[in-house]
Amino acid sequence: MHIVADYFPLLLFFIAYKLADIYVATGVAIVASIAQIVYFKVRGRISAVHWLSLAIIVVFGGATLLLRDETFIKWKPTVLYSLFAVVLATGKVVFGRDLLALIAKGLTLPAHVWSSMTWLWTGYFVAMAFANWYVAFNFSTDTWVNFKLWGSLGLFLAFTVAQGVWLSRYVVEERT
């Protein structure tokens, strides 16, 4: 159920775009993101990722609606992915911490694997930021919306499956 809640605003954005236009879809995404925060608040905890995503959709989506310029909403995923990459890289370089280890507390991995995982995710987010930017500003809005849902979701699934296969060599199972 958590994965549905995570992708709720994106799915509604996609549906609203297909039924109306980019401006209606942007408004729907803003409202859906607020509803998502309320849902997670009721369920107990709102992650920093959800707060960050809400702030970016409100700012970039708001600019899109206010200025009637779809350029701003197209920047939203690039900005979000870039911020994720910066946070992970800063955690590692400046603070010497693998922030993913804090998120995945139940996963026991050797330190060098956490470090590799941090850089893999940083690279993934940089690649996704570039991919979104490239598609957003070199293809039609319709192509970008399709990429935003199907392309980004497919790339995320492929990356996480590949990472899961790679990580399976290092996971330490507890003996009972």
Image (cartoon, helix red, strand yellow):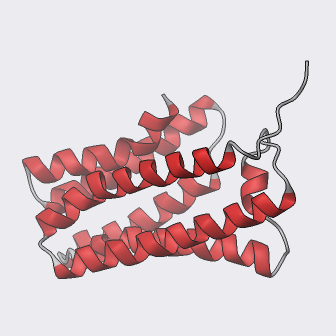
Residue 17 location (% of width, % of height) = 15, 53
Residue 175 location (% of width, % of height) = 90, 24
From the viewer's perspective, is residue 95 above or below residue 57? below
Residue at horizontal 40 percent and vertical 44 percent from the top = 7
Residue at horizontal 11 percent and vertical 72 percent from the top = 140
Q: Residue furthest top?
A: 176
- Locate residue 102 relative to residue 125 in the image: left or right: right
From the viewer's perspective, is residue 42 above or below residue 101? above
Q: Quadrant of residue 100?
A: bottom right
- Locate residue 57 relative to residue 139 in the image: left or right: right
Tell which of 9 and 100 is nearer to you: 100
- Locate residue 74 relative to residue 118 in the image: left or right: left
- Locate residue 127 relative to residue 168 in the image: left or right: left
Q: Quadrant of the C terminus?
A: top right
Q: Residue furthest right?
A: 176
Residue at horizontal 24 percent and vertical 75 percent from the top = 136
Residue 168 location (% of width, % of height) = 68, 42
